[in-house]
Image (cartoon, rainbow, N blue to C red):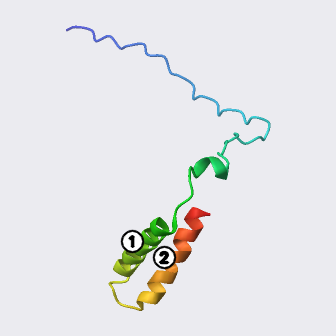
Amino acid sequence: MKEIKKSSAKKVAPKAAPKAASGKKPVVKVAPKAAVQSKPVNPEQRYKMIEEAAYYIAERHGFNGDSAYFWSLAEAEINTKLN
């Protein structure tokens, strides 16, 4: 009968948790607002954006409800995104 050799694999100790960097959080740089918006939106573009947003809001509500309400929600959403 042949002898079966067992592999001599070394057991590895679990790694220690990384040390906290003296309680500091990593720095995340955010671009200034002026750098994000390249050029202003003209009134016609703004109107189209509100129109499209109002459509999708109405769609989420199953097209049941007041269109003026959907328009006002869309207007607020677009104003927030543009400012």
Residue at 37% across, 76% down? 55
> Judging from the image, what secondary structure is the residue with disc 2 in?
helix
Q: Mark 1 points at which residue?
A: 52
Image quarter hosting the N terminus: top left
Q: Where is residue 4 in the image (x, y as percent from the top left)?
A: 28, 12
Q: Mark 2: give few (<14), some (14-19) or many (20+) Cα within 10 Å.
A: many
Q: What element carries label 1?
A: helix
Residue 44, x across and y down, in percent: 46, 68
Compared with residue 64, is residue 42 higher up or lower down, i.e. above or below?
above
2 or 44: which is nearer to us?
44
Instruction: Farthest residue to the top: give it.
Output: 2
Q: Residue furthest right?
A: 22
Picture layout, residue 78 above or below residue 28: below
Q: Is residue 44 left or right of residue 6?
A: right
Task: Pick whichever, 25 or 63, lies toward us.
Answer: 63
Which percent across, then down, holds residue 75? 52, 76
Q: In which quarter of the image is residue 57?
A: bottom left
Residue beneath disc 2 = 74
The amino acid beneath tag 2 is Ala
Q: In this view, does 23 lie to the left or right of 29?
A: right
Tell me the kind of residue under disc 1.
Glu
Identify the residue at image location x=34%, y=78%. 59
Marking on residue 16: none
Q: Earlier in the sequence, mark 1 or mark 2?
A: 1
For the residue pair 3 and 14, the one nearer the viewer reads as: 14
- The quarter of the picture where the C terminus appears is bottom right
61 w.r.t. 80: above or below: below
Quadrant of res 56: bottom left
Q: Do the residues bearing badges 1 and 2 touch, measured as CB atoms within 8 Å? A: yes
Q: Distance between the residues labelled 1 and 2?
A: 8 Å
